[in-house]
Structures are given as C-alpha cells and as structure tokens.
Amino acid sequence: MRSREFFVRMKPALKFAFLLTIPALLAQTPASFEVASVRPDRSGSLNTQINLMEGGRLSITNASLKTLIRNAYGLQAFQFDGGPGWLDTDMYDIEAKTGRAEKITEAQLPALLQTLLADRFHLKVHWESREAAVYALLIDKGGLKMKASSSDEVPSGDTGRGVNRMHIKGVALPVSFLAQNLGNRLGRIVIDKTGLTGKYDFAIEWDPQSDAESTGPSLFTVLKEQLGLRLETQKGHMDVLVVDSAEKASDN
C-alpha cells in the first residue's frame, strides 16, 4: 500500500497537514453537495490535495477512499480497520459544490464528505471501542520549557520528514495540535494531559530511527529537553472506525 500525506488548503495562514474534526454545530453545515463529480485518477502521482475554494466548491485530486474516509471522520491511520483491498490503491478526483456562495469551512467539510461517501461509494461503517496502549502527554518534572505565543502571532504549523529527520513545528497553536501529530508519528493515541489551555510556539526535530544508525536525538529526548514535556505509556481505549462495506464509485 502507498502511504500519502494529504493537505487541506484553506487560508494562507494555515498551511499544515492535519486531520479534520467533526463540528459541534452541524446545523450550520450544508446537508450535502448540490452536485459532485467523481472520476478515477490515473496520473500515478504520489501527491494528494484537498482544496476548499470560493463559491462553496471542493476540489480533491488523487485521493484514495481511505484518505477520504480519514478526512470525513477525523481519523489517524491506526484508528481504521476493514474495507476492500482497493481502499488505499484506487485513486479519485472529485469536484463538488454546495450551491451556496460562501466558502466551505474546515468544520463543515467532514459532514459533507460523509454524505458524499455514503451516496457515491455506498460506504457503510461502524465505530468500535478497543482497549489499547496509549501515550499520556505530560509536563516533565523539570518544568515546562515551551514558549507561550504572543497575541499578535498568526497560527501556522508544519509537519514533515527528511533523511533521518522528522519535525513538528507550530506557531500560536494549542497543545492538541502537537498531541495529534505525535500520535500520527508514533502510531498510537496521544492524550493531552498537560492541562495547558493556551496557544504555544514549538519546533522539534528528531531522528526516527532507534538503532545503531541513529544520528540525532530521539523524539522522547527532544520533548523533554526542548519543550519540557514527556510521554508516559498508559492503558486506555481507542475508537476505531470499521468499514463494513464500500463500492467503487461510478465514473461521472
């Protein structure tokens, strides 16, 4: 299976990859797209883009059904189970519009995607709560070293990897952004138990290797030494979305 990062482009200040969360106020969300075109993507590209544009338009390029489901339900990769074998290999381009003048927000997109997936892919899913080892993100005994952001800073973030390096950077972002992206990198749920409610600036870079070829500090080391945080393994539960069935979308 091919692994891809997926990006949601909204306003210039927010240029980071993330998983969207389901909104608390669904009443403000359009019930469904007025029109939607779903076509197979045969470009062979390794890049996936999800763009929210003016006029209530959504443009998705080169996305697998798995990527679409993760965005629709706010999933990390390890919170997903089941589904047909083509879920992560068949790629699609989608053009859709709500019929409204206003731009789709990141809070509105999940519900719209859920309806689209049910209509066009006949997607059926259910949730399960499974016992799992989780990480608790805590303030280290040495005290917090992470810098609180100033009120005039524009929120922005970035995650990525290079040769023997991974990084997470944030400006004026909540600790929840850090926790979620740590979970993505570690393949395990990270629960924010710091009690921190403000916005913070942080930038960490580490070597993801844990063998003799490692050339830099580990993630656990940089969290402690640079941010004053630590990860503690605990027993917990994880919500998993199970795909019961799905069909390939018709070409239109």
Image (tube, grey):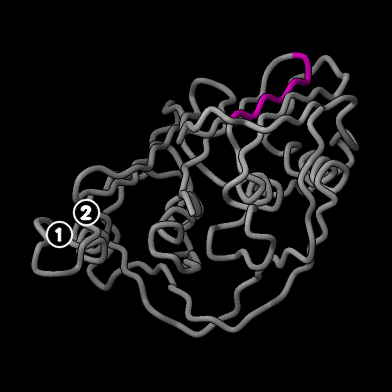
Quarter occupied by residue 36: top right
**Of 196 and 102, which appears nearest the observer?**
102
Q: Residues within 10 Å of mark 1 (few under 14, many from 20)?
A: some
Quarter occupied by residue 51: top right
Instruction: Classify 22 as above or below 27.
Output: below
Q: Position of residue 93 (x, y in %)?
A: 66, 29
Q: Residue at x 44, y 72 (%)?
A: 136
| Magenta-colored span | 55-61
Q: Secondary structure at mark 2?
A: strand
Q: Is residue 31 magenta?
A: no
Query: What kind of residue is marked 2?
Result: Trp
Query: What kind of residue is marked 1?
Result: Pro
**Of 18 and 84, which appears nearest the observer?**
84
- 244 left or right, relative to 190: right
Q: Position of residue 2 (x, y in %)?
A: 47, 49
- 154 left or right, relative to 22: left
Q: Residue at x 69, y 62 (%)?
A: 83
Residue 217 image label? 1
Q: Position of residue 125 (x, y in %)?
A: 79, 62
Q: In 3D space, how far apart are the residues under numbered discs 2 and 1 (Cα atoms)?
A: 5 Å
**Of 247 and 180, which appears nearest the observer?**
247
> Do the numbered discs 2 and 1 sit on residues whose CB atoms are within 8 Å?
yes
Q: Residues within 10 Å of mark 2 (few under 14, many from 20)?
A: many
Q: Position of residue 38 (x, y in %)?
A: 76, 31
- 5 left or right, relative to 120: left
Characterize the magenta stretch by its predominant secondary structure. Answer: strand
Q: Secondary structure at mark 1?
A: loop
Give the mark nearest the N terminus, 2 or 1.
2
Find disc 2 in the rendering and name its residue: 206
